[in-house]
Amino acid sequence: MRKSVLLLVSFLFLSVTLFAQSRIVSGKVLMPSGEPAVGATVTFKGFNKGTATGTDGTFNISVPASVKVMIISGIGIASQQIDVSGKTELGSITLSNSSKVLDEVVVVAYGQAKKTNITGAVATVNGGEIADKPFTSPDKALQGEVAGVQVSSASGAPGSATDILIRGLGSLTAQASPLWVIDGAIAQTGDLAQNTVTSNVLATLNPDDIESISVLKDASATAIYGSKGANGVIIVTTKRGRVGKTRVSFSAETGGNSIAFLPSNKSCTTPEYQTLLREAVINAGLATTTAQADAFITSPNGYGVQPANYTDYNTNWLKQVTRTGNQSQYNLSFSGGNEKTIFYLSGGYFKQIGEVVASSYIRQNGAFSITHHANDWLTVSAVVDGGASTQHTPFNAGFFDNPALAARFLLPWFTPYNADGTPKYNDSLNQFPLNGGPWNPAYTQVHNKNEYQQTNLRGNVALEIKILPNLKVTSRYAAEYTDIAEDQYLNPFYGDGYSTQGFGESVYSRYYDYTWSNFADWRQNLNRGGDIYFDLKVGYEAYQFNSYILNAQGQNYPITLSLQYLAAASTPLVASVVPEDNATTSEFSSGDINYKDRYVLSGSFRRDGSSVFGANHPFGNFYSVGGTWNVTNEHFLQNSRIISLLKLRGSYGQVGNANGFGNYSALSTYSYGKTYNNNPGEAPSQVGNPNLTWEKINTADVGVDAGFLNERIVVTADYYDRTTVALIQGVPLSLTSGFATVNENVGSMSNKGIEFALDVKPIRSRSFLWDLNFNIAHNTNRIISLYNGKPIANGLFNYSVGHDAQEFYIRQWAGVNVNAGTPQWYTDGTKATITGSYDSANLAFNSKYHADPSVYGGLTNTLSWKGLTFIVQLTYNFGNSIFYNYGSYLNSDGLYLTAFNQDEEQLKSWQKPGDHTNVPQIIAGGNHNSEGSSTRYLYNGKFVRVRNIELDYSLPKSLVGKAKLDNLTLYVRGTNLFTFDTDKEIPFDPETGVSSTTNFEEYIPKTIVGGIKIQF
């Protein structure tokens, strides 16, 4: 009994002693501007636990009495140390302007790192820069944000895909877009639709749930991803909870959208078209006067144009296929927790009705994350986000059911509606015949359907075990599941479905992939002061991808508009199932050694084994080496009043490309579904190649990060040289083999370029801030070698040694003969000889005509005064040419008159000897093949676009505090508001995607929204 009492007293005494040795430390962290530092990490030297600041910048944590140094850090926040010896209430802590950029923490492959230790080219975009933007997906919000990242949208359809290239085109036949990693999951991106015109799997990810995006551009940053990192890596980190009270954030916005760019070169009106018709008839010798020309045009033996239409109607078809769209979005989130457990929960709704008829996109999404520190050595976490969306998109390209095509092709004297308001088709005036197009969009866009439904889930579960204070092991299972259902219906009464009495197609697609990563992180100090150390990471990873696509088609529908699903079709056409998969197993490692934050050497190595490649080369090794000299930390610069940051970087490495050319390209395969003598059969379908292996990209990068005047001016500049070797190409085979080509690793290509980014703070005071960000990039692409040096035809391009992979290879237009009004071409690329015969002109290169821009980038101005913030972002693109795919139809010089409308440029045609113009004489029946494909239909792709304008007003804290709120912000935003410095003759939006060809896609929208954000 006595021993028990003594033990109890001892325990109570020890508890009191331990309690007396701890204290509560609290305070508030402010940015240099005076705004709260939200989500900053607060830790203490010698103490394992930490906390994070809330939305008002405050923190509160119990720490041992012995701690003396508090460290404030975070993503995008410069690390700063504070002396807290014996203190409890710290009051307001304003981060100093002298905090160095090198101390900032950014997300990199498999973790985070201080900028001091980064030897590669890494750029970061904070989630706040893309949140609440009126875009359907985060990739669209990256345009103009990062030097060297080319972002372009060929289509403006709600929920459409976006083209992204990092440092140029890295492959001719394999995938050239970057790898996306979302919360550790290798994400599917781009257009996964089989039938829909354009879709974007990333559109289910709500930009409002994103904490940060890191763009990894060189081998030092990407080589740890091995065979998947060839074209750069984009790492997305979604939001996590914060220690402290539960915080609620709500935002709502609504607005409208319209066409962003209306070219000055429009379609002809009826009076303008009359001028062209009369001119064409007279020039062809079919009439000598205007009256005779009109008689021929309206005569049944002539063009047969109905006189009433020809004189009385003037339809603006662009207005008929477009409208004022609208959109709205709502987001609600909860976050909070304590020192052991933090959580984040959100939900959102987005709806966009496009500015083109029959286009819309609706998304519901949610996200949840939880992190639990079970004890000092074990942390468990789980993250999941998902979305469900429904998209309606009209046809594009040359489909007669394409409203964008109808707006340019339909004759202006056609009218869309009957007197009773019903849409016209096959009417008494013989407009819109049943078996010819383009179709009347007033009918087809109401009675046809093209629907795309997508469900997407992605996330991870992870365990982090701290074995030693400087050694931890992480096991993370990340996965993504995508489910897509597409339904198309073409009505039996009119349009593309008329000839088959209706047509339907249904496609079901299912994608599942997982990434299981297991890795250890070891940091070891090499001296007592701890300022010489190394970090080492080693790990194993398994990846598997599975897809399943079911397609069915049918025709002959009931004569009704109420039965639109495929089950109503009486004649089946197609039924097919295509399952595919691939797998990769990997070992990887990376490490760096740091000498007093002055010199850092880094390296990485990864060995991948892939099911995609041949039996003789299933494994590939990828690596990088890099170094940096943080000159700022040298003694001779520490007291400099001018140079506050100077970092020199250099790296070299090799990464691989295993995506985009098929999962079974190395195998000899047979296809089934054949018949032989009325029995089931099979047939060889592909020649295998057991030696097929990765395309490899060798990248060298040198860069400098410099800051001046206490980082009022920060400059980042890089030069890179990327060489792709072992390009995968189809090598010709003797046709006696039964096959035309076999895939082999032959050929090489280079991309060389420079990038420059500038961040300037011309004014930085307690009440007013002006921040200016500018970036520009230039890339030169060249093909170095091909199989036997022979060019490879690729549509408008021709892969050829010594040329840009996207250099146009077409006949060279020499203009109009000033004396005769006839077309002229150069006989070849030397431009030494001119011919009037289209057949005598040869296809040729011209180095100034290429699809990739010479320079591109963005400029952002941010002005803040008290609670007001005004942001203007410009994006620009110069030096590329765009091919007008349908220019030969709409600038036909008389060939397609009365069949299709013509561009107003035709009104500038040659009239008399001595006229200098680019449009030949208009002649009924055409003018010596003047409409043939040539550089005549290339336009300058330059443009400057006001990508984003934003005006925010945050109500004063003293006012919102009375309503028990932390923050209330009102805002107005506009995207794609103005486009200028374009080719004056261009008849379409100059933003056309990385291929720089027009395909009558849905117009890119101009959007204006207003909204509110509330936090409490």
Image (spheres, helix red, strand yellow):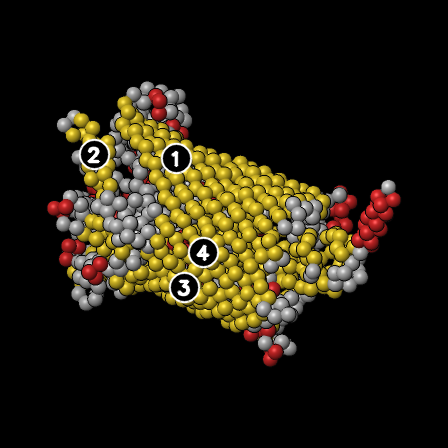
Q: Is residue 446 left or right of residue 803?
A: right
Residue 934 lies, in percent from the top left, at: 24, 55
Precedes in sequence: disc 3 or disc 2: 3
Q: Alpha-carbon distance for marks 3 and 1?
A: 37 Å
Of the residues shown, which amino acid type is indicated by label 1? Ser
Residue that label 2 marks: 682
Specify the quadrant of the image occupied by residue 156.
top left
Instruction: Give the number of the disc on residue 588.
Output: 4
Q: Alpha-carbon distance for marks 4 and 3?
A: 14 Å
Q: Alpha-carbon distance for marks 4 and 1?
A: 32 Å
Precedes in sequence: disc 4 or disc 1: 1
10 Å crowding of disc 3: few (<14), some (14-19), many (20+):
many
Precedes in sequence: disc 1 or disc 2: 1
Residue in the foreground of this view, choosing between 144 and 711: 711
Residue that label 3 marks: 653
Contact flag, marks 3 and 2 (Cβ < 8 Å): no
Question: On screen, 630 above or below 485?
Answer: below
Of the residues shown, which amino acid type is indicated by label 4? Phe
Question: On screen, 207 above or below 119?
Answer: above
Q: Nearer the viewer, mark 3 or mark 1?
A: 3
Q: Nearer the viewer, mark 2 or mark 4?
A: 4
